[in-house]
Amino acid sequence: MDVSESVIDGDVPATTVVVSDTAPRQPHSKVQRIESGANEPAVDVPPDSHRDNSAVAEINGCGMNANGGKQLQVDETNAIGCGALRVVVVAPKAKIPTRAYDSAGYDLASAYPEVIPAKGKCEVRTGLRIALPEGTYGRIASRSLHADSHAINVLGGVIDRDYRGPLNFILANHSDEDFKIEEGERVAQLIVERILTPNVVVVDQLEETERGEKRLGSSGKKDMPS
């Protein structure tokens, strides 16, 4: 598998991923799908990617590491059955989401410097747009370092598969001091999760269970001495 770099309109470098011996496709119009090491037809990228200074990269859902669309590395063995996380880069300083070790999440970096006021919140802009694999949704979660050391947490953070807008999220600062975010700093993580969407069925009653209507804190109480 070859990875080559190209330049769109002489500005933002983009990455074209070539499978087997097929010819590379222009990254601003098509991307080659990488699943199970097979050579499959190219797929359309989101319509909002067809704009000047946009770069397209395709991240394997189980092991492609990248940095700004450069030096992509693919682990085809781990890729089997995972689909692809397609990323459109729309800001010059945006960073492609990356995984470290066998982490569950892809680190998300801010494409712009920001300041989260004490006891306040701030919208963080990644400079990316994404298309999630079929049968999944995205969940933006806090990074342990920021949550534990600086009391910085993500608010909300569910991304539906059909969403094609900017990948932005809200960070809340629970500390008594302003928190400065540097350009390119990793401040959250994107976790891609399988989703079940069962049909909704209205019934007359629910089956009985041992727990019944017992609420919070009820589990384990029956084993405690009175």
Image (spheres, rainbow, N blue to C red):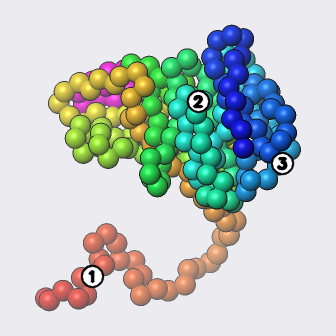
Residue 81 percent across, percent down from the top left: 69, 60
Spatial CA span between label 3 and label 1? 53 Å
Q: Secondary structure at mark 2?
A: strand
Residue 87 percent across, percent down from the top left: 64, 34
Which is the main secondary structure of the residues drawn in magenta? strand
Q: Which residues are magenta?
A: 114-124
Residue 128 percent across, percent down from the top left: 58, 29
Between disc 2 and disc 1, the foreground one is 2
Residue for badge 3:
40
Comes first in the chain, label 3 or label 2: 3
Q: Amino acid at mark 1?
A: Gly
Relative to the observer, which residue lies in front, 7 or 226? 7
Residue occupying the point 52% across, 37% down: 97
Q: How many marks?
A: 3
Between disc 3 and disc 1, the foreground one is 3
Residue farthest to the top, as pictured: 10
Q: Looking at the picture, does residue 62 appear above or below residue 177? A: below
Residue for badge 2:
70
Residue 3 percent across, percent down from the top left: 69, 35
Residue occupying the point 75% across, 28% down: 27
